[in-house]
Image: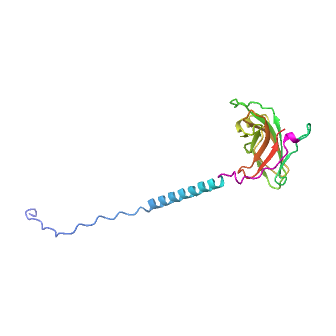
């Protein structure tokens, strides 16, 4: 009843307790590990891409020698260009350039191209695989926007054995084209044909 009048007995001295240990955040280690693995994989892909697409000037595939248009008798049509073991036949002739709806102006040359697959495997063709060497010796790649704006553009497709594709490809140059060059997507195989 009168418990507040009497002092409470002191508790014996005890050592301070250690604070509780913080739990290890394993999910944090897991996320950092996955992120590090992702960076490693991306690094490997970048290194592989650089190695595969590095300076290929020393080991570029040999181009097929085709007589130039000037070496033919006048009035004869140019023979089709054959590359590899006769896998591809290319015929190239200058065509009339018509500015497309999206044209921004400038000097352009149009070439009517026919590609025939004579090989046993399907052949991927695309207007972006073409370039021309003009009379000044400069090589110019195709302009996709101008090419698709033509009345009969060259389409991107896979040609089966014996199939052909014909269409107009446009190049940004004022000089007359002398040689048409078609390279595969990796630049490993190229075919050339004179432009008539």
Corner quadrant of residue 72: top right
Q: Nearer the viewer, residue 30 or 127?
A: 127
In reply to whether residue 59 is colored magenta, the answer given is yes
- Look at the picture and state if 88 lies above or below 76: below
Corner quadrant of residue 91: top right
In reply to whether residue 150 is colored magenta, the answer given is no
Q: Quadrant of the N terminus?
A: bottom left
Q: Nearer the viewer, residue 196 or 136?
A: 136
Corner quadrant of residue 129: top right
Please indicate whether residue 104 sits to the left or right of residue 152 in the image: left
Q: Quadrant of the C terminus?
A: top right
Instruction: Please give the name of the residue rendered at 80% of the width and 55% of the height, measured from the top-left corner.
Output: 121
- Look at the picture and state if 69 lies above or below 57: above
Please indicate whether residue 71 sits to the left or right of residue 4 in the image: right
Question: Total of numbered circles in the picture?
Answer: 0
Instruction: Please give the name of the residue rendered at 77% of the width and 30% of the height, measured from the top-left corner.
Output: 98
Instruction: Please give the name of the residue rendered at 80% of the width and 32% of the height, measured from the top-left corner.
Output: 96
Spot occupied by residue 31 in the image (x, y as percentages of width and height):
48, 58
Spot occupied by residue 20 in the image (x, y as percentages of width and height):
31, 64
Q: Main secondary structure of the magenta part?
A: loop
Spot occupied by residue 191 in the image (x, y as percentages of width and height):
79, 48
Query: Colour scheme used in the picture?
Result: rainbow
Instruction: Please give the name of the residue rendered at 79% of the width and 53% of the height, measured from the top-left corner.
Output: 122
Spot occupied by residue 183 in the image (x, y as percentages of width and height):
75, 48
Specify the segment rendered in magenta: 54-71
Q: Nearer the viewer, residue 121 or 93?
A: 93
């Amino acid at each position: 009843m009168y418990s507040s009048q009497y002092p409470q007995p002191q508790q014996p001295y005890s050592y301070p307790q250690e604070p509780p240990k913080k739990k290890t955040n394993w999910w944090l280690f897991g996320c950092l590990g996955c992120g590090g693995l992702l960076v490693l994989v991306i690094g490997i892909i970048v290194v592989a891409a650089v190695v595969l697409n590095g300076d290929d000037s020393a080991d570029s595939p040999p181009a097929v020698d085709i007589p130039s248009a000037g070496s033919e008798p006048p009035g004869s049509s140019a023979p089709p260009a054959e590359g590899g073991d006769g896998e591809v036949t290319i015929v190239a002739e200058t065509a009339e350039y018509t500015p497309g709806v999206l044209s921004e102006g400038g000097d352009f040359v149009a070439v009517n191209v026919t590609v025939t697959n004579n090989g046993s495997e399907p052949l991927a063709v695309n207007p972006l695989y073409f370039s021309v060497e003009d009379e000044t010796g400069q090589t110019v790649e195709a302009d996709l926007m101008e090419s698709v704006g033509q009345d009969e553009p060259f389409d991107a497709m896979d040609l089966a054995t014996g199939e052909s594709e014909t269409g107009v490809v446009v190049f940004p140059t004022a000089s007359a084209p002398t040689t048409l060059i078609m390279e595969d997507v990796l630049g490993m195989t190229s075919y050339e044909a004179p432009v008539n």
